[in-house]
Image (spheres, coloured by chain):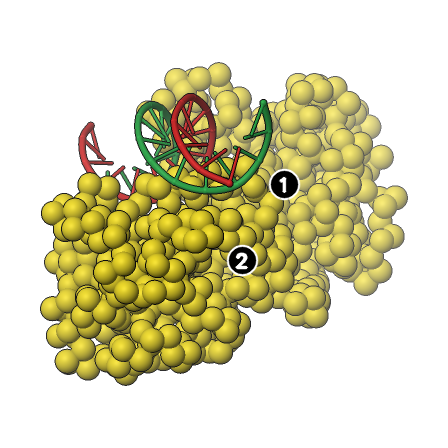
Chain colours: A yellow, B red, C green
Amino acid sequence: MMVESASETIRSAPSGQNGVGSLSAQADGGGGAGTAGTAPAAGRDASGREAASGGADSNGEMSPAELLHFQQQQALQVARQFLLQQASSLNSPGNNDSKQSASAVQVPVSVAMMSQQMLTPQQMQQILSPPQLQALLQQQQALMLQQLQEYYKKQQEQLHLQLLTQQQAGKQQPKEALGNKQLAFQQQLLQMQQLQQQHLLNLQRQGLVSLQPSQASGPLQALPQAAVCPTDLPQLWKGEGAPGQPAEDSGRQEGLDLASTAVTATSFASPPKVSPPLSHHPLPNGQPTVLTSRRDSSSHEETPSSHPLYGHGECKWPGCETLCEDLGQFIKHLNTEHALDDRSTAQCRVQMQVVQQLEIQLAKESERLQAMMAHLHMRPSEPKPFSQPVTVSADPFPDGLVHPPTSAAAPVTPLRPPGLGSASLHSGGPARRRSNDKFCSPISSELAQNHEFYKNADVRPPFTYASLIRQAILETPDRQLTLNEIYNWFTRMFAYFRRNTATWKNAVRHNLSLHKCFVRVENVKGAVWTVDEREYQKRRPPKMTGSPTLVKNMISGLSYGALNASYQAALAESSFPLLSNPGMLNPGSASSLLPLSQEDLGVPGEPLPSNGSSSPPRLSPPQYSHQIQVKEEPAEAEEDRRPGPPLGAPNPSTVGPPEDRDLEEDLGGEDMS
DNA sequence: TTTTCCCTAAACATAG
DNA sequence: GCTATGTTTAGGGAAA
């Protein structure tokens, strides 16, 4: 009886905009028990009024002020009772099911906020090992338990004090005094909110390793006080919710608003529809809209006909979900309900604190991430250790660093395919890689490093078909392959091409025919395809001044400091093929650059994986072929045309067609120029 | 906005 | 006729 009455009283509070509402707000705020204030429905209002009137009747004749005071006292008592209960439940979780009507008032507030925070960065699950996750989880739980205990203890004391003072001076107090008390309560509420935000943030961190709210039973069940599982919240609140509440409202609100309304809504004597500082609509990623609403607004509410605080037909003001049919109505609502006043200011302040906390949290998490990455040697900004023939360019995982794919035996979607920058990871999309691919051609080293990954993971390699074909051809001792052998190389090297057979073969043929860098040579056993390196490099004339990407890569390559002046000069002079080869820029290979002829001859001293990871026994032809080019083009031509017509006879003269093509393109490549 | 590159699809031709 | 191979064209997406 007591509980019901009080809770109904609180519910009725929001219906009163100012005077009465403010009083109820005190009660609500003090106890944090006014959760029911969501009160979307008139029915609930009505019931609240009934309860209030019932209380008045039971007391016989009461003045309005007395009635309000009585209601307030009731609410405070309920709140106090609730807090006691919660405090006890901290030590013995799971025994408050029977008292949900009261406990649900407050607990879900934090729980709801928690649960909404749970989803956020699931990546941590992929990063951390299960033991780490477990340890982190336990740590967070212990921290939260401690905070909750402190929090409820503090709130209980405050409420008790408030109750005593009110009982003493309540009846004679004029309305001004009530207003002062209201301010005091609001301050308390602010404190509460801050505490809740702390809980939220702690849980947010916990959410890093937890599951989605819908699945969050695991982590949340472990929460000491929260004995109420988030998944139970809707039913819980519905059970307690107003019977007369429209179905759509109940469905929309899912009871969460009930939970979270407690603090802000009633405490600020907000309109009936006020709801928690946190929005009820979790985003797909699990973040509450309120926390991201401002940012979201830039993304999906940027249209001129929208407003950052207006979305999905309702007001996004924290704690307000007033339905507005259109923007005009919303603007009107905004100007009337959220004008510049104490309440709005307070809410704004709270929101600022939320944002501030989140920013702090973000900073912490970022720092942690950096530390983790540093620990895992994933130092993007750190200069790569030289002797890395690999990616001079934008490879996010420089050599020697951890390559997720390599370690990821998981054929599933990797965290990030190697060599695939921040760009598209969509396995279904085209494997394009403009700057890296052609200019720097880290393909050989990258393939060497991530050979196993590509072999097992159904991930499309981030290289163009041309690059792959070239790589396939150059990997062979005699630099020539039949079409079928190229096919086999694709399927052997990449799981992706084993599965997706529909289009890529056609694409391979198309590329072979289209690009002049691929030279078809008639062989005794048929036609084989070779690579005209010079032509391949010509596809985009790599001029130092012409290609920003190239220049950048050059700079980054030079930053390793291993390039000597002469080599740099050589680079500058031989403006083309060399530049496109990361291995050439690689300091570690710089020493081996000059003895080009050796590598050209196929000396297995391939500069490839300095980390010695999964380097295939085969050489990485592209590199020496480049080197050959750099040094002297004739040698390169000799090299590339070795597989020429007379089969295995690396005689340049025997290479008829390629030479012709080259001559043609020297005049101006039609394809790639 | 335009250009360029790449991918994809398709049609067609040729040879075995 | 079928298949594999090779050539060519066209259109769309994405990046520069």
Which residue is pictured at 19% across the width and 66% down the height? A633
The quadrant the N terminus of chain A occupies is top right
Question: On the image, numbered disc 1 is attached to which residue?
Answer: A260
Q: Is residue A253 visible?
A: yes
Q: Position of residue A434 (x, y in %)?
A: 32, 50
Where disc 1 sits, the SS reads helix
Q: Which mark is residue A493?
A: 2
Q: In this image, A126 relative to A58: left or right? A: left
The chain to which mark 1 is attached is A
Q: Position of residue A392 (x, y in %)?
A: 32, 67
Label 1 Cα crowd, 10 Å radius (few <14 / some 14-19 / many 20+): many
Q: In this image, A174 relative to A262: left or right? A: left
- Circle 1: residue type: Ser
Residue A606 vs residue A603, the one in the foreground: A603
Residue B6 in the image: above or below residue A618:
above
Residue A616 in the image: above or below residue A122:
below
Which residue is pictured at 59% across the width and 48% down the height? A498
Which residue is pictured at 74% across the width and 26% down the height? A242
User: Who comes first in sequence, dot 1 or dot 2?
Assistant: 1
